[in-house]
Image (spheres, helix red, strand yellow):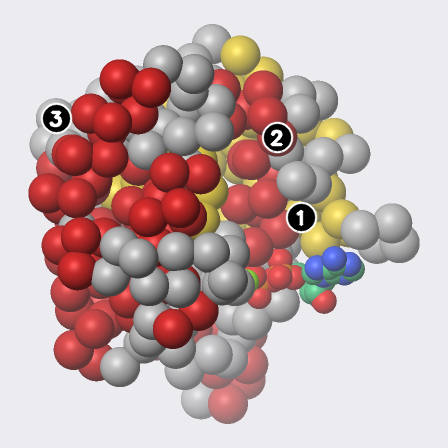
C-alpha cells in the first residue's frame, strides 16, 4: 500500500457526555487505503472516538477532516452520505427480520432498485452466509455469523471509510481469524478501515497503522509493527495502563 496524504484527520478533538471530557485533545491521521487500528485500555475513549467520526457524539472542541470537509457538526445521516459507515460494538441487526432484509436495509439511502440488486449480488458473492441463511431470522445466527451479516449490510452503501468497533468481541478463535480475513478483504477492495480492537496483537499485525489511546489522548502512533514492538505497550494487551506497568516494574 502506497503512503498517501491523510484521509481522516483528527485535530484536537475534545468530547464527552455532559459532565467531564472523555477525549482530551485527540490528534492523529488515518491514511487513505489502509487499515488503521486503535487500541487502548477499557474506558480510554475508543468507542467515543469512533462515535465522533459517525456523528453520534459531537465534539465540544476540535475538528475531524474527511474529504475536505469538517465532519464536526454534521448529522449522522450527512456523514453516512459522505461514505462513512460504522458497525457498532454491540450487535445491531434486527433480530426478528431475515438476513436478507437486514442486508437490504443497509442500502436505505439508495433509491435505485437496480443498484440495490447489483450490490446485493456483490455482497452475496463476498459473504456466502447471506445466501445460505437468507430467509432465516438474524437472531438465529451465531455471534460470528451476525458480524459477517453486519459487514455485508455496511458494504451495501459502498462506503469509502468503514469504521468497526471491536468486531472480534465474543467470537471464538476460529471465527475471529475469518473475521480478520474479512476485514482484510474489505480493505483490499479499496475501503479504508478504521477499527478498534481488544485483540490488539492480532489486529495490529494486520493493520498498516496503529494508534494507542490512553485516558482520552493519543499515547503513541505509528506503523502497526512499530506500535506492536514498542516496549511500553505490552501492558495494554493485558488491559492495564502504561503508567501502571512502569510503577509495577
Ligand atoms: N453514553 C455515555 N454516557 C456517559 N458516559 C459514557 C457513555 N459512554 C461511555 N461513557 C464513559 O466514557 C468513558 C469512555 O468510554 P468508551 O469510549 O466506551 O471507552 P472504550 O471504548 O475505550 O472502552 C468511560 O468512562 C465510559 O464510562
Ligand atoms: Mg468500546
Give the mark nearest the N terminus, 2 or 1: 1
Is 45 displayed left or right of 115 in the figure? right
- CA separation, marks 1 and 3? 30 Å
Q: Dot 1 lies on which element?
A: strand
The quarter of the image that holds ligand 1 is bottom right
Q: Quadrant of residue 32?
A: top left
Q: Residues within 10 Å of mark 3 (few under 14, many from 20)?
A: few
User: What residue do we see at 41% from left, 48% from top?
Assistant: 102
Q: Nearer the viewer, residue 245 or 181?
A: 181
Q: Is residue 70 above or below residue 191?
A: above
**Residue ID at (21%, 80%):** 173
**Contact between labelled residues 1 and 2, with CB atoms less than 8 Å apart:** no
On whether ligand 1 comes within 8 Å of the CB at mark 1, the answer is no
Q: CA distance from mark 2 to mark 3?
A: 30 Å
**Number of residues whose C-alpha sits closer than 10 Å to that of mark 2, classed few (under 14), some (14–19) or many (20 or more):** many
Q: Nearer the viewer, residue 236 or 104?
A: 104
Q: Contact (CB < 8 A) between labels 2 and 3?
A: no
Report x, y in % for residue 87: 44, 49
Question: In the picture shown, does residue 124 fall above or below 212?
Answer: above
Q: Is residue 240 above or below residue 76?
A: below
Q: Earlier in the sequence, mark 2 or mark 3?
A: 3
Q: Which residue is mark 3?
A: 2
Q: Give the CA distance from mark 2 to mark 1.
A: 19 Å
* Residue tagged 1: 23
- Secondary element under disc 2, as helix, strand or loop, is helix
Residue carrying label 2: 76
Q: Hey, which residue is sitting farthest top in the picture?
A: 68
Residue mark closest to the camera, 2 vs 3: 2
Q: Residue, x 80% and y 51% (percent of image)? A: 17
The residue lying toward the viewer, choosing from 236 and 133, is: 133
The percent position of residue 64, horizontal first and vertical second, equals: 56, 26
Q: Position of residue 178 (x, y in %)?
A: 15, 65
Amino acid at each position: 500500500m502506497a503512503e498517501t496524504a491523510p484521509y481522516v484527520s483528527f485535530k484536537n478533538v475534545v468530547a464527552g457526555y455532559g459532565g467531564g471530557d472523555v477525549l482530551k485533545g485527540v490528534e492523529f491521521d488515518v491514511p487513505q487505503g489502509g487499515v488503521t487500528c486503535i487500541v487502548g485500555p477499557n474506558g480510554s475513549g475508543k468507542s467515543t472516538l469512533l462515535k465522533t467520526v459517525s456523528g453520534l457524539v459531537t465534539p465540544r472542541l476540535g475538528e475531524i477532516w474527511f474529504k475536505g470537509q469538517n465532519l464536526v457538526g454534521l448529522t449522522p445521516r450527512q456523514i453516512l452520505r459522505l461514505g462513512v459507515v460504522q458497525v457498532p460494538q454491540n450487535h445491531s441487526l434486527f433480530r426478528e427480520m431475515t438476513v436478507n432484509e437486514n442486508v437490504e436495509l443497509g442500502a436505505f439511502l439508495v433509491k435505485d432498485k437496480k443498484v440495490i440488486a447489483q450490490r446485493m449480488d456483490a455482497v452475496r458473492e463476498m459473504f456466502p452466509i447471506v445466501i445460505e441463511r437468507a430467509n432465516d431470522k438474524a437472531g438465529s445466527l451465531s455471534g460470528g455469523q451476525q458480524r459477517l451479516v453486519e459487514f455485508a449490510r455496511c458494504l451495501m452503501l459502498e462506503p469509502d471509510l468503514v469504521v468497526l468497533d471491536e468486531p472480534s468481541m465474543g467470537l471464538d478463535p476460529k471465527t475471529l481469524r475469518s473475521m480478520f480475513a474479512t476485514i482484510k478483504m474489505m480493505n483490499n477492495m479499496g475501503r479504508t478501515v478504521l477499527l478498534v480492537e481488544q485483540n490488539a496483537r492480532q489486529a495490529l499485525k494486520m493493520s498498516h497503522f496503529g494508534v494507542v489511546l490512553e485516558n482520552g489522548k493519543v499515547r503513541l502512533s505509528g506503523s502497526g509493527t512499530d506500535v506492536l514492538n514498542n516496549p511500553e505497550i505490552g501492558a495494554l494487551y493485558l488491559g492495564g495502563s502504561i503508567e501502571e506497568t512502569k510503577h509495577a516494574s
